[in-house]
Image (spheres, grey):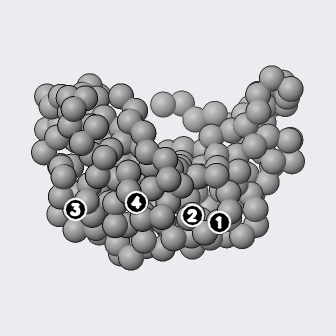
Amino acid sequence: MEVMPEENFFSFLDNRSGFLDGVCITGGEPTIQRDIQEFIVQVRERGFLVKLDTNGTIPAVLKELLEDKLLDYVAMDVKTSLEGYTRDMGFRGNTADIIKSIDMIKGSGIEYEFRTTVVPGLIDTVEILEVAKMIKGARRYFIQNFRPGYVLDGNLSERTGYPPGKLEEFRKILEPCVEETGIRN
């Protein structure tokens, strides 16, 4: 993909002032960008709200953004159980960072959600039960059904999502642990 120069992006925002309410910063993982804080400051200086989509693997950056009150909403992907991060996702970082990020977000005082994309063969009842323990006490959690198509792991391109009944079963597992649960297809 072609990279848009920052000045073009901010010119785009300036031209839409009054029409757009906010900017969603998403990725890959946006907290790996060294200048994310400065970028968000420039967005906020223009009067826009900021939503961050994160996987929670870099809690130090998340902490700075929250402490500096630069975020209006955070959506964190909780991919699987802590064991599943290393076993199934190939995560080589410290899974304690995932828990740190979850706890920070829950205690931040801003609006947030946690979400898991449920991939058949990777996410099942065992993982959902573990996710429920990880996010217990959260305000909002969404189950997102897997959609085949263009995926980074070619082995997943032939899989289909879960049927509605299974998604509802997962949601019911989470319901006692979270104020609001939902399903996104």
Of badges 3 and 1, nearer the viewer stands 1
User: Given the image, on which type of amino acid does mark 4 rest?
Assistant: Cys
Q: Tell me if 102 is positioned left or right of 90 in this view.
A: right
Which residue is the site of mark 2? Answer: 105
Q: Label 3, label 1: how many angstroms apart (C-alpha)?
A: 26 Å
Of badges 3 and 4, nearer the viewer stands 4
Q: Label 1, label 2: how many angstroms apart (C-alpha)?
A: 5 Å
Q: Label 3, label 4: how many angstroms apart (C-alpha)?
A: 20 Å
Which residue is the site of mark 1? Answer: 108
Of 56 and 172, nearer the camera is 172
Outermost residue, front direction? 176
Q: Disc 1 vs disc 2: Cβ atoms closer than 8 Å? A: yes
Q: Position of residue 136 (x, y in %)?
A: 42, 65
**Nearer-N-terminus badge (3/1):** 3
Q: Disc 4 vs disc 2: Cβ atoms closer than 8 Å? A: no
**Nearer-N-terminus badge (3/4):** 3
Which residue is the site of mark 4? Answer: 177
